[in-house]
Structures are given as C-alpha cells and as structure tokens.
Image: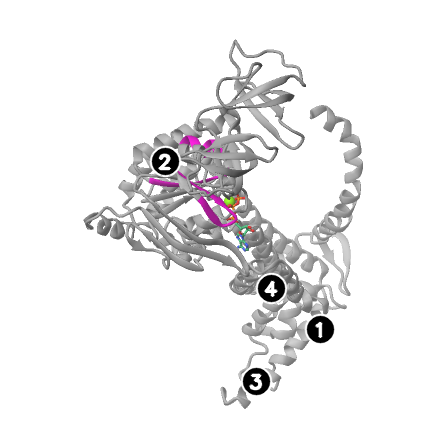
C-alpha cells in the first residue's frame, strides 16, 4: 500500500512536501484538543513538535497515524489525502511513547511483523530484519522477549520495528522520555544518525527543549492545541514570536514594557520601573504599544563599573552555582528582578556578596520586544 | 534481603498455618479418604468394609460376565460414559468460549462505571441456586414449555422440537451453569490488555482480524485458558444438568459417581474409584498444559 502512494509521488512533477496539514482540528466532546493546525513538512526533514504536557502533541501524531479521526481539516502525505484511510493503510509508522512492543514475540518477531503484514517474502524479511537488528545493535538479543530487556534496548526494538517497513514518515512520540539522562543523550545521537542515513522524514514529539533544539531541522512550538511558532531551532530561540515561546524555550527574563519611540529598526522601550531599554521586534509595532521584553540571561553581563553601552543598575540578590555556569539574580527595583548567567571560566568573578551594586549590560540586538 | 526474609521466616510459617489447615482439612483429607475407600470392599447397604481389594477398579475396567467367572473383557460401558462426559464438557467449554470471549471483550472495553453494571448483570443469575436454575431451564425447554410454544405460535415450527433428554439440553444446561467462569477470567485479562498493542499492530499494516488472531488472543491467552479450565473441569464432573435435562442416553460420569453414594443401592468403593480415575484424568490434562506453558516461556 505504501508502494502505490510513493510511486505516484515520485512520478509527479513538483516534489511534494512529505506532509501537509491544513486547518486540522480535533475536539473531544466539547473540549478542543487542536484548533486549526497548519504546517508543511519537507521530505527528509527532522521536524519536532514541542510543547508542555497536554498541549495536543500526541493527539496530532495520532491524527497523522490514523488512530483518531480529524474533526476538521485535511492531511496530505506526498500529495495524497490520507485523512480517511485507516492506520494500516497509511505508509507511516509510529514509535510509541511506551514502545507497545508485542510481549509474546521475540525481538526478531516484533521487527518482522510489519514486513509480514506487507506480504514480503520470507527471504526479504530475514534480510531486512537482520539489517535492522544490526542497525540498532541488538543482533545478540534477536531471540529475546521484550520483557527481558532494558528500557534502552526496548526503545531500540521499537525504533527498528517502526523503521523496518521503510515508512515514508516516521512518527516518534517522546521515544526517549523513559530513559535516563546518559542513555537519552546516546540515543539522541543515534536517532540523528539513523535519520540522516535513512533519509526518512521524522516527526518527533517531545517536551524537552534541549532534545528539540539539538535534533531538529525545524521545530513547531505548541501550546493549548495551537501552533505558536514554526522555525529552525536558532530562530525559535533567538527570535521567539511571543511570550510563550520565549519562556518555554530556554530561560528568559520577561519584563513588562511600553514602546515610547519607534526607530528605523530599534524600538525605545520603557520598563515598568522607568528604565529605558532598546529592543527589536519582528512584528510591526507602533508607539505606545504595551508588551514585554525578553532578555536571555546569557546575553547579559555583569560589571562593577558602568560599561560604555546601554546598561541597567541593580544589586545582587542571589548567586547560584550551576556547574558550567554561574547564575546571578539581580534586583533592579522592588518589582523587577533579572537573571544573569556567566559561563564558569577561570577568570570568573569568584566571590560576590549579595547586596553588592552592579551594572548589567545587554548584548547588541539581544533584547526582543514581544507584543503578545 | 536474605537477612530480612530469614528474620521473618518463623512468622511467615505461622501466618501460613490457617491456609495449610484449610487446604489440608477440606482438600487433601477428603481426597485421601476417597483414595482409601476406592481400595476397600463394598458394604451392601452403602458404606465400606475394611478389607483391601482392587475389586472397584476391576469392575470399572473389566467385564467378567454376570457371575464374575467369565474371562475378563474390557468394560466399554463405563469408558463410553467417560468419553461422553469428555465430549460434553469439551462442547460446553467450546460454546462458553465462543459466547464468553466476545462478552468479556465487550464488557472490558466499556467505560469504567458501565463495566461494573455489566459485570453485575453477568453474575445476577448466580444469586439463584444452581438446582433451581437447572429445573427452570427444564421447564423452559420441555415439549410444551414457553420456548416450543413460542416458536410454534410464531409459526417457525409446526410441532414441538424435542430438546429435553437430548445432548443439546445437557449442553445448554452446562453452558448456562458455567458461562461466568469463562467470562470473568477473560474479562480480567482483556481489562489488563494494553490497547496500544492493537494500535501498534494496525500501524504495522495489520487488518483487524489479524490483530485479533496474532496480538489480542495470544496476549490474553492465560485468561482464556483459565476460563476453559474453570468450565471444563466442573462440566466433566457435573451431574445436575445431565440428570435433570438429559436422560439415560446422556448419562455422565458425575451422575455415575453421584449414584454410587445415594441411598442403599450405591457402591462406595466403586464411586470412589470412578472419582479417582476422573481426578487422574484432570490432573493429566492440567500437567500437560502446565508443561507446554513452561516450555513456550523461554
Ligand atoms: N480520548 C480523549 N478524550 C478526551 N480528551 C482527550 C483524549 N485524548 C486526549 N485528550 C485531551 O487532549 C489534550 C491533549 O492531549 P495529548 O495527549 O495530545 O497531550 P500531549 O501534548 O501529548 O501531552 P503529554 O506531553 O503529556 O504527552 C489533553 O488535555 C487531553 O486531556
Ligand atoms: Mg503525549
């Protein structure tokens, strides 16, 4: 079944996007889990859905896989509408959050299941499963049942099982969330390698921003059933579209501000305590507009003397040791606190007494004005 | 760990005492008693004489003619009763499975509060005594009972269909008696079944009936086997349904044993021997099953 769709797509003129969602929505009773989701995912892309728990990531994957019916909108896979096909007719495979390995089958049987269903010959199945167990380094475990394997091994079985039928698109629902930190980092590298080598389009769900930033070609940040922003990791991080994205990806200081003057590409903003900061905005903004300013802690620098450029005055409240970094909480006024982060180098300011007066300078272009 | 469990070992033995007592008194002791009786001589008005003999087993297995002096031939009558009992029990198990599995699946896939109601409904008939239920079944299916009259009134049949005193009636009785023993263990297994497995199979291009055959049924198999054992074993020894709904032609091993202990006409050692042979049969089946299970669980 997968064949039919892919052949047609290959013979088509323009290379169709791997997946196109138009106005996709999903409601459960009177609860709206997804509203008007639109995006296109390119061929061979590593696309990540990122968002807090309950924002609809799994629901979106389940709509693409076909486990749930859409309430509205269309889903196209390589130019074919697949919204009405049952899951077993869609050439996409899923790596489930809890793996969902067949407990009564060995690793080998688990991986070969999809191939058997597609009617591959015995010989082809054996060759392909052999490849897959080597690829995920489980060749010694081929005859084991999943219950007798570690979490990381099970995860790899799930991956091999889903990749064996050569799906056009692989859906991964937080596949690393059950693993410990060390294993998770290993598997990340592994996933990225597999995706590059196989050229399969990945739709990867996570609520871990580190995972999203390091793996993805593009990220869609979601919140409450809506897409907030789609873009490459650096765009999402450097140019967040709104407060939610700025706060969810990485750490940031969000300060209420009002635009007092609109320059060529710089806005002059007044903070709630009257200080003036220059910021940039991607959206057109007019004078008098209220919003917030996002300042990343690592874009701020502390110094004892007043620096040359723009700076804010405050006093140190708290110093936190974070291993690679030091984090300082600085009080600007009664209501305004800023977090500042310095990398721990040999020449770092060693002892700072709480209460010490300091200046904070803002790196060029680092301040973003956000309307929403 | 070892130190802790060692420290608790004496206590644990004491805590086990009540269960050992119950198992010993109500299970081991009666079986031993039957075993001993089966090797004793019969007393003519019921009861036993304490003289060891193999007569009961001999009577069960061999036919030595009316006066006991003919050369021994295999006693087919009892073996036939045994065989009939096994087929009847297997049939009842089969029908309970065919009806019980979808029922259990249906209940297990309802919403939580609906489940409770359905399970309650399944057990409602069992609030009434088995004897009364079997008798009422007899009234339902007899020649001029509501079933036949209803079908006649509807014009579906011309004359009453004889159900009573047939194998069908016995099947019906056994089915009705033991259906919940099939439904409940399967329900428990399906309830624990992770439906993500079905989704995973469907994601891997499996159509519905393959998911049923290759994923759902194998995974809930322990529940199915438990249900089959719970229906098969009591059906094998049942005597109420065969007695009340079947006739002489549907005589089953349970009735045979039952008769030996009734009134003055009985033969206790013979009944005990038949019971022992039945027990042996059941144990052989269960052992074979247990062995096949442990082998497949590598
Ligand atoms: N079958 C359902 N019936 C009713 N509500 C549902 C159903 N499935 C999901 N929801 C609701 O839809 C919302 C989105 O759920 P979803 O599972 O997609 O979240 P998620 O982003 O995957 O979260 P997590 O990171 O915790 O896995 C949740 O509020 C959830 O309660
Ligand atoms: Mg989820």
The image quadrant of residue B67 is bottom right
**Residue at the image position 42 percent from the left and 49 percent from the top:** B201
Left or right of A284? Residue A201 is: left
Q: Do discs 3 and 4 belong to a common subunit?
A: yes
Q: Do discs 1 and 4 belong to a common subunit?
A: yes
Q: Is mark 1 within 8 Å of ligand 1?
A: no
Q: Which of pointers 3 and 1 lies earlier in the amino acid sequence?
A: 1
Determine contact: label 4, label 2, CB under 8 Å: no
How would you rate the neighbour count of disc 4 (Cα within 10 Å): few for under 14, some for 14-19, many for 20 or more?
Answer: many
Residue mark closest to the camera, 4 vs 2: 2
Distance in Å between CA atoms under marks 3 and 4: 24 Å
Q: Which residue is mark 1?
A: B132
Decide: is A364 above or below A216. above
Q: Which residue is mark 2?
A: A217
Q: Which residue is mark 3?
A: B148
Span highlighted in magenta in the image: A201-228
- Measured as percent of width and height from the top left, residue B238 is found at 64, 64
Residue mark closest to the camera, 1 vs 4: 4
Distance in Å between CA atoms under marks 3 and 2: 74 Å
């Amino acid at each position: 079944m997968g064949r039919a769709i892919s052949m047609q797509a290959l013979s088509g003129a323009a290379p169709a996007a791997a997946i196109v969602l138009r106005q996709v929505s999903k409601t459960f009773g009177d609860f709206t889990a997804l509203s008007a989701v639109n995006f296109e995912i390119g061929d061979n892309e590593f696309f990540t859905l990122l968002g807090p728990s309950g924002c609809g990531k799994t629901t979106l994957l389940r709509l693409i896989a076909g486990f749930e019916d859409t309430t509205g909108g269309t889903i196209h896979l390589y130019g074919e509408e697949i919204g009405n096909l049952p899951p077993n007719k869609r050439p996409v495979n899923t790596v489930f959050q809890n793996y969902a390995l067949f407990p009564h089958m060995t690793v080998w049987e688990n991986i070969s299941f999809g191939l058997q269903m597609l009617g591959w010959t015995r010989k082809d199945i054996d060759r392909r499963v052999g490849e897959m167990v080597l690829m995920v380094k489980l060749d010694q475990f081929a005859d084991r049942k999943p219950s007798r394997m570690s979490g990381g091994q099970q995860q790899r079985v799930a991956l091999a099982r889903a990749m064996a039928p050569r799906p056009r698109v692989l859906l991964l629902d937080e596949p690393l969330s059950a693993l410990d930190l060390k294993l998770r980092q290993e598997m990340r590298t592994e996933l990225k390698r597999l995706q590059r080598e196989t050229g399969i389009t990945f739709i990867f769900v996570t609520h871990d921003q580190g995972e999203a930033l390091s793996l993805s070609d593009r990220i869609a940040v979601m919140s409450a059933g809506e897409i907030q922003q789609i873009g490459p990791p650096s765009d999402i991080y450097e140019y967040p579209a709104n407060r939610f994205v700025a706060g969810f990806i990485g750490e940031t200081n969000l300060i209420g501000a009002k635009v007092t003057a609109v320059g060529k590409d710089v806005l002059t903003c007044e903070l709630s305590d009257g200080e003036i900061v220059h910021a940039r905005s991607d959206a057109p903004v007019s004078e008098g507009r209220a919003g917030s300013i996002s300042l990343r802690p690592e874009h701020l620098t502390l110094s004892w003397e007043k620096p040359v450029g723009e700076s804010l005055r405050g006093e140190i409240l708290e110093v936190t040791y974070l291993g690679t970094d030091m984090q300082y909480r600085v009080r600007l006024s009664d209501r305004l606190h800023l977090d500042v982060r310095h990398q721990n180098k040999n020449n770092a300011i060693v002892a700072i007494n709480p209460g010490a007066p300091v200046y904070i300078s803002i790196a060029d272009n680092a301040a973003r004005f956000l309307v929403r | 760990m070892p130190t802790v469990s060692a420290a608790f070992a004496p206590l644990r033995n004491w805590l086990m005492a009540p269960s050992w007592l119950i198992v010993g008194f109500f299970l081991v002791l009666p079986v031993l008693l039957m075993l001993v009786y089966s090797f004793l001589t019969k007393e003519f008005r019921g009861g036993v004489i304490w003289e060891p003999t193999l007569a009961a087993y001999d009577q069960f297995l061999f036919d030595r003619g009316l006066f006991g002096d003919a050369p021994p031939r295999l006693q087919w009558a009892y073996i036939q009763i045994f065989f009939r009992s096994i087929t009847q029990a297997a049939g009842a198990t089969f029908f309970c499975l065919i009806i019980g599995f979808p029922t259990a699946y249906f209940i297990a896939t309802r919403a939580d509060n609906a489940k409770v109601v359905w399970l309650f409904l399944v057990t409602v008939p069992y609030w009434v005594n088995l004897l009364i239920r079997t008798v009422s079944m007899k009234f339902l299916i007899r020649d001029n009972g509501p079933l036949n009259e209803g079908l006649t009134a509807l014009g579906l049949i011309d004359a009453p269909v004889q159900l009573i005193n047939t194998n069908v009636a016995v099947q019906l009785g056994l089915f009705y008696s033991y259906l919940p023993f099939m439904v409940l263990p399967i329900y428990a297994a399906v309830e624990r079944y992770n439906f993500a497995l079905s989704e995973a199979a469907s994601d891997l291009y499996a159509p519905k009936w393959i998911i049923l055959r290759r994923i759902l049924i194998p995974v809930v198999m322990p529940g199915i086997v438990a249900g089959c054992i719970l229906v098969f074993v009591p059906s094998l020894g049942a005597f109420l349904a065969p007695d009340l709904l079947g006739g002489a032609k549907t005589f089953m091993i349970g009735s045979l044993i039952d008769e030996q202990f009734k009134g003055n006409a009985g033969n206790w050692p013979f009944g005990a021997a038949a019971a022992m042979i039945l027990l042996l049969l059941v144990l052989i089946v269960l052992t074979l099953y247990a062995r096949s299970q442990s082998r497949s669980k590598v």
